Image: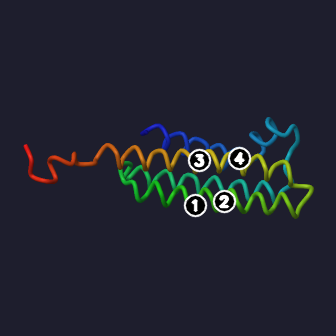
Amino acid sequence: MRVLEPFRAGYGLCQLGYPQEVPGIVLGRRLDSRAAAVVRVLGARHLLQAAVLGLAPASPMLHRCGSVVDVLHSASMVLLAVFDRRRRSAALADAVVAGVFAAAELRAARHYVAAFRVPTHRRQGIR
């Protein structure tokens, strides 16, 4: 699961450095200046989250927390799509990306819980 943090960091760098490029490719149009500024902030958030998770990549708790952050981000984008027609397509696209990151974080958390689980016979002192 060590691929998640570098992928998130790369995505964050793209958002931070080139906020118009990904939406331009996906949506076929440029974002307004306010939306581009928000994309940069979200890119910085992805970089920070990747750095924190990179410090303790085998921590199921950190991956669960990362998933919660991504779910909240996705939910906020859905709300934006409901209330702002001009930004609807960009918000829904971002909600999908955040949802994929949330699912990946949960999968990583489950992977690390399973990887470090002590077999039952060892916990009970049976050899």
Q: Nearer the viewer, residue 14 or 88?
A: 88
The answer to whether 11 appears left or right of 112 in the picture is right
Q: Which amino acid does label 1 sit on?
A: Val
Q: Earlier in the sequence, mark 1 or mark 3?
A: 1
Question: Residue 69, labelled with which disc?
Answer: 1
Residue 73 locus on image (x, y percent): 66, 59
In space, the residues marked 1 and 3 are separated at their CA atoms by: 10 Å
In space, the residues marked 1 and 4 are separated at their CA atoms by: 14 Å
In space, the residues marked 3 and 2 are separated at their CA atoms by: 10 Å
Q: Which amino acid does label 4 sit on?
A: Val
- Seen at 21% across and 48% down, the residue is 120
Q: Earlier in the sequence, mark 1 or mark 4?
A: 1
SS at circle 2: helix
> Is mark 1 in CB contact (under 8 Å) with mark 2?
yes
The answer to whether 110 appears left or right of 18 in the picture is left
- Seen at 81% across and 61% down, the residue is 80
The answer to whether 99 appears left or right of 36 in the picture is left
In space, the residues marked 3 and 4 are separated at their CA atoms by: 9 Å
Q: Which of marks 2 and 4 is nearer the N terminus?
A: 2
Q: Earlier in the sequence, mark 3 or mark 2?
A: 2
User: How crowded is the residue under tag 4: few (<14 C-alpha within 10 Å), some, or many (20+)?
Assistant: some
